[in-house]
Amino acid sequence: MTTHPNCKINIGLQIVGRRADGYHELRTIFMPVHSMHDTLTIEPQPDGEDVVMTQQGIALDNAAADNLCVAAWRLMHSEYGIPPVAITLHKGIPFGAGLGGGSSDAAFTLKMLNAMFALGLDDATLSRHAAMIGADCPFFIYNRPAYATGTGDVLEPIGLSLDGYRVEVSIPEGEHVSTREAYAGVDCINIDHRPDLRQAALLPVESWRGVIENEFERTVLPAHPAIASLKQSFYDRGAVYASMTGSGAAVFAFFASF
């Protein structure tokens, strides 16, 4: 069985504060983008003793055994006793770019295993399992626009229509923003007023600039001028809205396609 886990972008990202558990409380809108994806193949391994993981494509900075796809299989093996499988992941989504590629891979693994072994789990159950793997993994179970709160794990469907626009996603060559760096910056930010993202997203996309903000940009862009330059280049090419996604370094832009 082969599928194509897609990436996501954040339309607006507000960091509300640090929680008692050390994580940050967020507000954001997740939107799936299918034009950038990985390729994930899972095959039964009836004579195997353990999962086999093969990584291809864009080189990752983790061992195959530490891939979130393996974590997803181990969770399903523990919960439902599914047998070993062979997983091949060809990476097309750059990692550490704010695009959620690893979370998408894990969520798609859960969905594939559910189908392969006829477990009959609904999306709500798969979502609870996904939350045990990563904060934004549940989003990829549903894989439709959602307003996210908590650590990104509390999802509310949102009627976001972007008909008439095309999205482009790009990453400055060689740029990487660590999660630690990004959050260290926002802890120092004092923001008095934040718009309701759910209401702001209902405005015409041309109105989003200056209203819908990724708050990580306030400290990441000055420290990474190549990311700021990429964002400006989208506007120079006629984008109606551009923003960094997640904690970076990827930037996306909407262009009117009519």
Image (cartoon, rainbow, N blue to C red):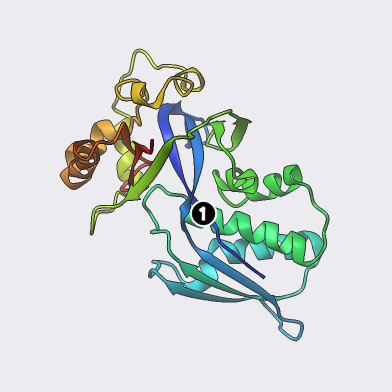
In percent of width and height, residue 230 lies at: 22, 45
User: In the displayed structure, does residue 58 sit left or right of residue 181?
Assistant: right
Q: Is residue 48 visible?
A: yes
In this rendering, is residue 209 above or below 167?
above
In the image, what residue occupies the spot 42% across and 16% down?
195
Left or right relative to 147: residue 98: left
What x and y, as percent, mark residue 172?
Answer: 24, 53
Q: Which residue is mark 1?
A: 6
Q: Position of residue 241 (x, y in %)?
A: 32, 32
Give the camera-side residue of 174 and 24. Answer: 174
Q: Quadrant of the N terminus?
A: bottom right
Does residue 114 appear to the left or right of 67 in the view shown? right
In front of the other: 247 or 227 = 227
Which residue is at the front of the view, 251 or 138? 251
Query: What's under tag 1, amino acid-wise?
Result: Asn
**In percent of the image, x 51 and y 22: which residue is there?**
198
> Is residue 116 shown above or below 243?
below
Query: SS of the residue at dot 1?
Result: strand
